[in-house]
């Protein structure tokens, strides 16, 4: 599929079941003048194909498709629309929204990027990806735009992430894998340009192969170089990929690729109303990934990225990948295809296990070897530390690996990716500084973004000069971070949360490609960064904290014992009233004690029998007490 450089020219293959003819618009070397519009002469089933004689690498082209204009049946063919080849690996300019992209019959060659023919990367042997032990979520522009160690000419690009100060920061933290937020070519949502805003996250792709030229002016080689540099530094690269919708949006969106190629096939429509799009994504439509041509596009894209050196993927709104006409199933065609594929089966696969469609929340239901973003972990940890009644038992379940979610299908704790804050929602600092979202800068009258954040402000809403409140916030941040790194499963931290980044209460900064979302390295809390690095190092030194099996409470001695702060066992009926408790972990070569206290005052502590040494505490205090709002780790000497 797509362009292939062969002897004598470029062979081009394009899917369109309902299109009657596919034309190739050939442009000059600058990509400005359309030189010819050539029909693909051959058709094999639903594949239109032909040889562009004499063409080669560097050819700039677009597609146009003739066919019926029958919106009521899902057909929106419009040969006036220049289309980007969904298999193009390079485009010559970024996408930009223009209302003409959505106007029927409007010529759009001046508005749409040109696809560029490039040789495909060689298919080589893929090494099995190492299992993540500490994932660091990162948006290229947000991370690098104000980084003092990155040359200004590189800021906002993948090349910035290869700079020595960046790699040193990641290594110093102990990061095992960087999870890059979307890097595929995207287009702003149509409501943003009139507001003077731009998409900052990239979760609005047009093409699943081409890197966005703003992030990768050097094309796919920029990502391959990043993966190679990180591999040399002991760090893997996970791509956050959006296989659920495209920037073509709803009926009022633009026609720039799949909609013009075959809208009725690529996107799911209501069964008894083929002109109405299904919107399980909240973005206007849903890719029909259970259909063979759409599934092939997705599979080919994933294999392509692996050949550039990525270790695996995080799938945005992953439930969509498991949807058929009947709803979600872990046996959906795309999921099955991924698990049997010899390249993908060895990759890291992480699902965001929800979408906004009916029955969309599917946490714990993806097949092995998928891991999943654990939204229950985030919510339960927040609710406990906020002080919600009756949440100690939920915290204990999350600390020990979320067996309630993952044990049923023989998936271990590492199926859970634990996080307290991520790109969407409050930053870790804002979580303890704001009780309410403050998204006015997004231009939607603060209607967008999650309302129920399980957050608290420690006595003042937002910025304050009260040093006592600031100290309480710092204490709570350390307790949250310590909880994250002492929990079983795989911890994930979003870039900047290691040094106290803020978005000033904006919990949906997708449209803030500006200092609201750009990390402020000049004001980084270096002490907090050092503390995070010590947590990660402690976790590496003590594998008992990150075991690959669930705790059973059995054995001699038992692998886990839940204790009150007086060292006596916790009875089932006592959990609901607990604000402080301990987890005793017994391994083959050491015993550890995790002690948690969410009270606002210190709590007396009786250690179990034996001699114990304190390895770390989120808050200083004498050995005989648990400091207020703290988590402490002990080791039996």
Image (cartoon, helix red, strand yellow):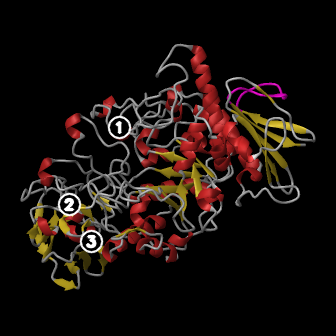
Q: 221 or 290: which is nearer to us?
A: 290
The chief SS type of the magenta part is loop
Magenta span contains residue 619: yes
* Residue at 35% across, 60% down: 244
Report which residue position mark 2 lands on: 29
- Give the Cα separation between the discs numbered 3 and 1: 37 Å
Measuring from the top left, give residue 96's x and y in whole percent: 22, 48
Residue 100 to residue 533: above or below: below
Asked whether 517 falls inside the magenta stretch, the response is no
In the image, what residue occupies the spot 43% across and 72% down?
Answer: 332
Residue at the far left in the pictured view: 105
How crowded pointer 1 is (Cα within 10 Å; few <14, some 14-19, many 20+) is rated as some
Specify the farthest residue to the bottom: 44
Say which quadrant the C terminus sits in.
Answer: top right
Q: Secondary structure at mark 1?
A: loop
Q: Which residues are magenta?
A: 618-629
Which mark, by number, is residue 56? 3
Q: Earlier in the sequence, mark 2 or mark 1?
A: 2
Residue 326, position as x, y percentages in the image: 36, 70
What secondary structure is marked by label 3?
A: loop
Q: Earlier in the sequence, mark 3 or mark 1?
A: 3
Q: Quick check: 153 left or right of 363?
A: left
Asked if disc 2 and disc 3 are in contact, CB closer than 8 Å, the reply is no
């Amino acid at each position: 599929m797509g362009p292939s450089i062969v002897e004598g020219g470029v062979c081009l293959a394009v899917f369109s079941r309902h299109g009657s003819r596919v034309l190739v618009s050939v442009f000059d070397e600058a990509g400005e003048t359309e030189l010819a519009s050539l029909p693909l002469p051959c058709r094999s089933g639903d594949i239109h194909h032909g040889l562009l004689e004499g063409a080669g690498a560097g050819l700039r082209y677009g597609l146009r498709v003739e066919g019926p204009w029958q919106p009521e049946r899902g057909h929106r063919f419009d040969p006036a629309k220049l289309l980007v080849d969904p298999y193009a690996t390079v485009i010559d300019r970024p996408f930009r929204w223009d209302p003409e992209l959505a106007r029927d019959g409007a010529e759009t060659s001046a508005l749409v990027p040109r696809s560029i023919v490039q040789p495909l990367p060689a298919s080589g042997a893929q090494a099995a990806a190492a299992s993540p032990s500490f994932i660091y979520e990162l948006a290229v522009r947000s991370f690098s735009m104000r980084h003092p160690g990155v040359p200004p000419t590189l800021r906002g690009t993948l090349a910035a992430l290869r700079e020595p100060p960046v790699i040193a920061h990641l290594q110093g933290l102990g990061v095992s894998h960087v999870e890059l937020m979307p890097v595929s070519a995207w287009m702003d949502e149509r409501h943003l340009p009139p507001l003077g805003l731009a998409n900052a996250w990239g979760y609005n792709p047009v093409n699943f192969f081409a890197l966005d030229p703003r992030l990768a002016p050097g094309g796919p080689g920029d990502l391959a170089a990043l993966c190679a540099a990180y591999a040399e530094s002991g760090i893997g690269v996970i791509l956050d990929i959006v296989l659920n919708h495209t920037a073509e949006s709803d009926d009022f969106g633009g026609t720039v690729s799949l909609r013009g190629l075959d809208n009725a096939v690529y996107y799911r429509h209501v069964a008894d109303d083929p002109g109405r799009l299904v919107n399980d994504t909240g973005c206007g439509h849903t890719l029909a990934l259970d259909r063979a041509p759409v599934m092939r596009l997705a599979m080919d894209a994933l294999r392509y990225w692996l050949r550039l050196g990525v270790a695996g993927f995080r799938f945005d709104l992953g439930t969509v990948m498991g949807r058929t006409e009947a709803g979600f199933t872990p046996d959906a065609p795309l999921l099955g295809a991924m698990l049997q594929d010899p390249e993908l089966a060895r990759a890291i696969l992480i699902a965001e296990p929800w979408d906004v469609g009916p029955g969309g929340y599917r946490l714990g239901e993806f097949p092995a070897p998928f891991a999943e973003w654990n939204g229950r972990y985030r919510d339960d940890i927040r609710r406990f530390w906020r002080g919600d009644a009756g949440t100690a038992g939920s915290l204990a379940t999350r600390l020990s690996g979320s067996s309630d979610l993952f044990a049923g299908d023989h998936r271990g704790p590492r199926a859970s990716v634990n996080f307290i804050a991520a790109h969407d929602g409050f930053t870790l600092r804002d979580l303890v500084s704001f009780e309410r979202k403050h998204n006015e800068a997004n231009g939607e009258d603060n209607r967008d973004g999650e309302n129920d954040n399980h957050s608290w402000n420690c006595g003042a809403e937002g910025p304050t000069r009260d040093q006592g409140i600031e100290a309480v916030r710092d204490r709570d941040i350390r307790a949250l971070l310590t909880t994250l790194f002492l929990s079983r499963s795989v911890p994930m931290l979003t870039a900047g949360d290691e040094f106290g980044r803020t978005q000033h209460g904006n919990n949906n900064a997708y449209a803030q490609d500006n200092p609201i979302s750009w990390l402020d390295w000049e004001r980084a809390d270096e002490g907090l960064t050092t503390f995070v690095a010590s947590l990660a190092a402690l976790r590496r030194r003590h594998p008992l904290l990150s075991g690959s099996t669930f705790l059973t409470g059995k054995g001699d001695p038992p692998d886990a014992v839940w204790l009150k702060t007086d060292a006596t066992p916790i009875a089932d009926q006592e959990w609901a009233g607990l604000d402080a408790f301990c987890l005793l972990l017994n391994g083959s070569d050491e015993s550890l004690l995790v002690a948690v206290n969410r009270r606002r005052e210190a709590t007396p502590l009786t250690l179990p029998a034996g001699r114990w040494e304190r390895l770390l505490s989120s808050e200083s205090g004498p050995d005989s007490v648990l400091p207020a709002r703290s988590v402490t780790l002990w080791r039996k000497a």
